[in-house]
Structures are given as structure tokens and as C-alpha cells.
Image: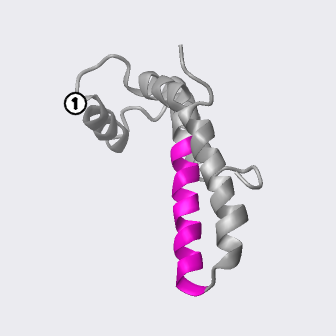
Amino acid sequence: MQDEPSGAALLDAARRALIEEVVPGLAGRPRYVALMVANAIGIAAREIAQADRLRETDAQLLGSAGDDALDDLVRAIRAGERDADSGLHAALSAATDAAADVWKPSKPGA
């Protein structure tokens, strides 16, 4: 059982406070640095919130294979061995969507 608010929610609240209350009073380099920190906090919060989804997409791509699974997959893709693999295409699309939701959210203010 997880206590509320979650770590992701706490990070989101800290990010909002930084953007709404601290950044407006800054200019120049300090403003830039504060916005960069707010962006990093947002990424971390989304990564925490999406942890299960990210694990699922990794499992779709790599299954329960050993540590060399990613290297083997990259080698097979580069060699053209998986070009017609629709399951791999779907798994790569899901992994890309999950990563994009963490790193570059489409929602305004996210």
C-alpha cells in the first residue's frame, strides 16, 4: 500500500510551485536554470507515474531473456532479420509512445 500523495504527485506539486511562484520573479540565467529544473522534475514525475507501462513495454520487447537481449534485438534489427515482424513493430510503437509521454508530453502544462 502506498501513502498518498504519491512521489509523482509530490514532484508535480513542487514543479507547479517552482513555475508559478518562483520563476515569475526571476530573469536571465536564473530563470533559465529554474525552468530547466522544473522540466527535469516533470520528466521524473511522469517516469514514476508511467513506471508500470514502461516495464510492460520493455517486457514486450525483450521478454524474459537475459542481459544480452537488447544487444541481440538491435543486432537482428540491423541485420534485417525482424523486418516483417508485426509483433515487434507493435512493441516498438508502444515503447516509443510510452517514452514520448514521459519525455515530451503532449498535454499543455505537463
95 over 64 or under it: above or below? below
Who is closer to the viewer here, 50 or 33? 33
Q: Residue 26 at x, y = what percent?
A: 63, 79
Residue found at the far bottom of this picture: 28
- Observer-nearest residue: 33 or 58? 33
* Residue 72 shown left or right of residue 53 in the figure: left
Task: Estimate how packed mark 1 is, as few (under 14), some (14 to 19) or many (20 or more) residues with alpha carbons within 10 Å.
Answer: few
The chosen color scheme is: one colour
Residue 12: in magenta span: no
Label 1 sits on residue: 68
As drawn, the residue found furthest toward the top would be 1
**Residue 85: in sight, yes or no?**
no
Residue at left offset 26%, top offset 37%: 71
Query: Taking 51 as reference, is 38 above or below it?
Result: below
Magenta segment includes 41: yes
In the picture, measured across the screen, residue 22 lies left or right of residue 65, that is: right
Can the viewer see residue 17 in this picture? yes
Q: Tell me where the magenta segment starts and ends, as one range.
A: 28-45
Q: Main secondary structure of the magenta part?
A: helix
* Residue at x 34% of width, y 44% of height: 78
**Point 70% across, 51% down: residue:** 110
Depth order, front residue of 63/104 = 104
**Is disc 1 placed on a helix, strand or loop?**
loop
Q: Find residue 47 and report its horizontal and vertical position in percent.
A: 52, 40
Among the 4 quarters of the image, the one containing residue 27? bottom right
> Is 108 or 95 nearer to us in this picture?
108
Q: Position of residue 52 (x, y in %)?
A: 52, 25
The x and y percentages for residue 76 are: 32, 35
- Is residue 25 positioned above or below 103 on the image? below
Q: Amino acid at mark 1?
A: Asp
Residue 90 placement: quadrant: top right
Left or right relative to 38: residue 80: left
